[in-house]
């Protein structure tokens, strides 16, 4: 009996000590548990972020960030392609079922005010290099017409406060892409300032430093790509950044929060951990054509199923609102009703209207039809039958093997000795087999004679059969970019989100603007419980 009691006591103690660990592990397996900072490995038992009984510093808490001015677009499987009256327009968007990961998207098109903010930053930082600013300015002459008096728009549209909230135009695809990169950098820089990771440095001081040290400009101008080097340099040399009165910046990082091993210093690996939690998950960019088209419709689903489709970003096929509200009979978008009859002039006295003028679609997005067309990320091809079914996009240009290897080293071995770095790059390429990552895939399987898969002449002829000469010629142009949505000078047919046209990436017009998106990282993890026979218990 005594022996039995002894075993009973040991069994109870084992339950007390083991059960909590099992409960945590079960919770983690469900996909919804987030380990707190200072947690313990569920697989080894070693502590995280604890120098007394652990070796691994890591961000164990995660909270996604919605970028300023954007809304979340939760994407379901959908059908992309021709969706409207089959009139005499290019049949260049064949229907196909596709899916996309979720993303954030600007509620409004980028405005004149927001573009002037961008140019002002460039003027302050690159005061000594006005060519940088000149390249960023919109082309205000896009308003000029040989037989029209549009000089007030040429002089005032971009610079006047009266047009602050109007969409910026005269911006090429390349300029829009550069704005997206700049916006990513400014979002992340502000996050790090708010988190006490870096100090705010006045732009005139930044300009002064990059003139004094032109070969080390990356140490003084924050970029997301160079964030690790920038943070490490600024925190090690913040006294180099003098204020306007000649005094060093009064700044100290939050050692209590960021000195994870408690040695009185914040080393490179610790800064890497800090950045993992402070920076945005992804970068601002132009939307892919698939993302833009999906978001424009604003269709709502019930458990992933659509009960209807739209011709425009609103329900119905009419250009006016017909219901019992106070707004019945009003236009739904800014477009050209007929010859000499622009809606914007009728309702606002202007060709374009403010970006918030018309009602939003079901996703909270404004002006996804009319007002101005919008650049998307894709290279144009008249043939869209050959696309990926998930996250479709044509336009990939991957970095070379050596650059890709360099990115891996920067991510995991930020401060290797240069000689050792060269050796490790060779290991990555030669031994790990990181090859064929580089390449230009804008022509990939696009059906033209130069890049037709396996030289199948029958497939090529089938693709070319119904195309116009312009479309045929354009199939091998890698600088032709897609724009969508219809503008203030377009007829209603072009307001259908499935319609697509192209313009060279270096060109611009007075009816094309843009908005940005940002990919999401991770997802909404929900635990699923299964019964013994395999069915999901809800």
Image (cartoon, helix red, strand yellow):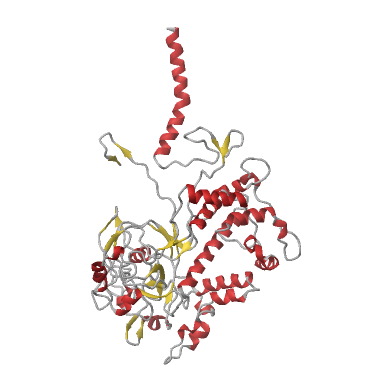
- Residue 66 in view, yes or no: yes
Q: Nearer the viewer, residue 26 or 298?
A: 26
Residue found at the very far bottom of the displayed protein: 147
Residue 25 at x, y = what percent?
A: 43, 34
Q: Looking at the image, is 521 positioned above or below residue 526? A: below
Q: Residue furthest top?
A: 1
Residue at x 27%, y 77% (from the top left corner): 89
- Placement of the C terminus among the 4 image quadrants: top left
- Asked whether residue 415 is in view, the answer is no
Q: Position of residue 149 (x, y in %)?
A: 45, 91
46 sits left or right of 444 in the view: right
Residue 170 percent location from the top left of the image: 47, 78
Residue at horizontal 61 percent and vertical 45 percent from the top: 257
Q: What residue sits 60% from the left and 49% below the top?
A: 420
Residue at 51% from the left image edge and 65% from the top image edge: 181
- Splitting the image into 4 quarters, where does residue 357 fall? bottom left
Q: Quadrant of residue 507?
A: bottom left
Outermost right residue:
246
* Location of residue 417 in the rendering, given as x and y in whole percent from the top left corner: 63, 50
């Amino acid at each position: 009996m005594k022996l039995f009691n002894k075993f009973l006591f040991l069994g109870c103690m084992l339950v007390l000590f083991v059960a909590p660990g099992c409960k945590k592990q079960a919770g983690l397996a469900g996909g919804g548990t987030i380990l707190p900072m200072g947690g313990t490995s569920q697989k080894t038992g070693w502590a995280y972020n604890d120098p007394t009984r652990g070796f691994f510093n890591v961000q164990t808490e995660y909270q996604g960030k919605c970028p300023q001015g954007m809304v979340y677009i939760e994407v379901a499987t959908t059908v992309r392609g021709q969706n409207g009256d089959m009139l005499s327009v290019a049949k260049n968007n064949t229907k196909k079922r596709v899916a996309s990961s979720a993303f954030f998207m600007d509620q409004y098109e980028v405005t004149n005010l927001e573009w002037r903010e961008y140019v002002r930053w460039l003027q302050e930082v690159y005061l000594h290099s006005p060519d940088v600013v000149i390249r960023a300015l919109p082309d205000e002459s896009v308003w000029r017409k040989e037989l029209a008096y549009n000089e007030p728009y040429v002089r005032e549209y971009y610079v006047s406060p009266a047009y602050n909230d109007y969409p910026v135009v005269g911006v090429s695809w390349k300029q829009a892409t550069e704005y997206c990169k700049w916006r990513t950098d400014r979002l992340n820089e502000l996050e790090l300032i708010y988190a006490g990771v870096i100090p705010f440095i006045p732009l005139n001081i930044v300009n002064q430093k990059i003139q004094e040290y032109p070969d080390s400009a990356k140490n003084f101008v924050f970029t997301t790509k160079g964030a690790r080097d920038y943070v490490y340099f600024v925190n090690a040399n913040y006294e180099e950044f003098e204020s306007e009165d000649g005094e060093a910046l009064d700044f100290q990082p939050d050692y209590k929060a960021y000195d994870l091993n408690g040695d009185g210093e914040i080393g490179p690996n610790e800064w890497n951990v800090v950045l993992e939690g402070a920076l945005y998950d992804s970068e601002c960019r132009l939307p892919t054509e698939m993302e833009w088209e999906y978001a424009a419709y604003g269709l709502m689903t019930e458990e992933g199923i659509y009960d209807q489709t739209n011709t425009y970003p609103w329900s119905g096929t009419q250009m006016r609102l017909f219901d019992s509200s106070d707004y019945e009979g009003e236009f739904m978008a800014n477009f050209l009703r007929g010859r000499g009859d622009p809606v914007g002039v009728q309702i606002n006295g202007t060709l374009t209207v403010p970006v918030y003028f018309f009602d939003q679609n079901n996703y909270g997005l404004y002006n996804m039809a009319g007002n101005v067309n919008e650049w998307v990320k894709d290279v144009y091809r008249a043939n869209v039958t050959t696309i990926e079914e998930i996250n479709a996009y044509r336009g990939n240009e991957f970095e070379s093997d050596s650059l890709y290897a360099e990115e891996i080293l920067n991510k995991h071995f930020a401060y290797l000795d240069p000689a050792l770095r060269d050796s490790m790059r060779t290991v990555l390429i030669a031994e790990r087999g990181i090859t064929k990552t580089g390449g230009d895939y804008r022509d990939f399987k696009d059906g033209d004679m130069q890049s037709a898969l396996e030289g199948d002449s029958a497939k090529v002829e089938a693709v070319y059969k119904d195309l116009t000469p312009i479309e045929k010629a354009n199939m091998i142009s890698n600088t032709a970019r897609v724009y969508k949505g219809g503008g203030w000078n377009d007829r209603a047919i072009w307001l259908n989100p499935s319609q697509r046209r192209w313009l060279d990436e270096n060109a611009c017009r007075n009816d094309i603007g843009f908005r940005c998106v940002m990919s999401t990282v991770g997802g909404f993890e929900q635990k699923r419980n299964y019964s013994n026979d395999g069915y999901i218990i809800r």
